[in-house]
Amino acid sequence: MRYYDCGGYPLCSREVLALPALHALPEAGEVLFGFHRTPGAGRDTFPVTAPSLLTAEEGVSTLVTAEEPETDPALAAVIAAGRMRAVNLAHPRQEELLPPLRRRERVRVNLLALGDVGSTLLMGLRLLGGDVIDSVGICDVRENVPQRWEMELNQIVSPEGERSPPVEIVSPEEVFDGDVFLFCASRFVPDTSVTSGDVRMAQYQVNRELAVRYARMARQRRYGGMFCVVSDPVDPLCRAVLEESNRDETGRWDGGGLFSHQVRGFGLGVMQARAMYYARKEPRFAAFLTEGRTYGPHGADLVAANSIEHYDDALSRELTERVVQANLEMRRLGFKPYVAPALSSGALSLLACLRGQWHCSSTYLDGVFMGARNRLLPTGTEPERLPLPEALQERLRHTMERLRAIR
């Protein structure tokens, strides 16, 4: 391993770089690990939380614990202290990836579209987000809708005077004047008469056009905050946002838009919650409550594991099917299934993310947005790594390939 001074930032790499050499790593502050990968093919930057992440290929293996190689003691100490972050030096804007990632104690959140999901999510942020949210901007093009929710939400006050973030109306041109942008817009939501099929994917093309419009706006504004997708289908829309924000006027990919770590999808939280719902109701699924995990998209290619340590493939696939079909059960009752998604996937997961807590969301991995338990560190997103059985890994590989095929 070689140590360098990269524009004032300490950097280590296995490659020979045309940079001034460092004789030792600093005892404090962030240390970068430089690697080269085709831009857009994987993560632009990520925390190095174990030495094996310096060599492992990106993909399902990123979610699996590995035998740790022998490492230079100084390097191992940096990793153990949580001070190392990997950076793709092949990215055309790699100099923007070198400084420490932006992190604020309280953030400005701007939320686009106050339909069923957006308005319910907004209630959760107002009630529960006072510790990490400074204020919330709301935007909706429908007449009087923003005015309604500005009045309603600012009239929710705790009897004990606990802080609630104020809600303010913003224009479409102002939605990127903040730290977190929540995309809750939808041009098409099937009504309750639709009780079969993948309802989420039915919305893809029309919602993609809208998401891409805002992705290009983020590019034009050189937006540096988080672009969070809540609208269905969450995971393919995240990929469209990332890819299209990085295309110029001719459609050529130039890397001039959002970085991969800026885009995140909030759809997996409710799938985890639905699996827990069925695990509480049916004893044969009970192990999920303490040992289970969900992976993948907010949709048909979800992977639920009844247990990591005592994985049962047949039982896990049955639980997966129950979770995937849960939204259709609600539709058969005559209601749109939006309350649990807005709160479990939206408000509660976003707040956990901002607090640096473990939660379920979709982040970029090997060219797709893959849902998994993760947390946001000062050095970036850390996916949970577990000793996953091979049968479960195979399911995850299948899901990633299915996500890769969606265009």
Image: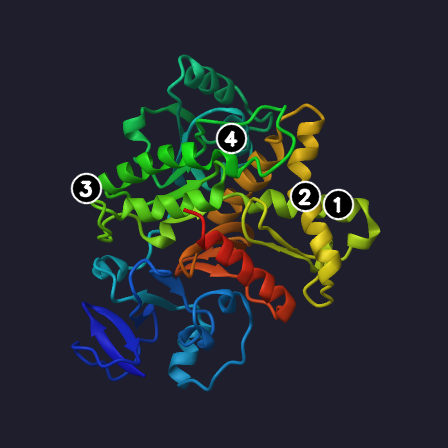
Q: CA distance from mark 4 to mark 3?
A: 38 Å
Task: Report which quarter residue 14 is drawn in.
Answer: bottom left
The disc labelled 1 sits on which kind of residue? Tyr
Q: Which residue is mark 3?
A: 249
User: What SS does tag 3 mark?
Assistant: loop
Observer-nearest residue: 72 or 296?
A: 296
Q: CA distance from mark 2 to mark 3?
A: 42 Å
The disc at residue 126 is 4
Q: Is residue 126 above or below residue 140?
A: below
Q: Which residue is mark 1?
A: 278
Q: Is residue 83 above or below residue 341?
A: below
**Residue 352 on image: x %, y %:** 53, 47
The N terminus - image quarter:
bottom left
How many C-alpha atoms fall within 10 Å of the one at disc 1: few (<14), some, or many (≥20)? some
Circles 1 and 3 in contact, beta carbons < 8 Å? no
The disc labelled 4 sits on which kind of residue? Arg
How many C-alpha atoms fall within 10 Å of the one at disc 4: few (<14), some, or many (≥20)? many
Q: Is residue 292 above or below residue 84?
A: above
The residue that appears at 80% across and 44% down in the rendered structure is 281
Circles 1 and 2 in contact, beta carbons < 8 Å? yes
Circles 1 and 4 in contact, beta carbons < 8 Å? no
The residue that appears at 22% across and 57% down in the rendered structure is 93
Observer-nearest residue: 210 or 261?
A: 210
User: How did the renderer colour the structure?
Assistant: rainbow
The residue that appears at 47% across and 24% down in the rendered structure is 114
Q: Seen from this angle, which residue lies furthest right?
A: 283
Say whether disc 1 or disc 3 marks the residue closer to the N-terminus.
3
**Residue 362 on image: x %, y %:** 49, 50
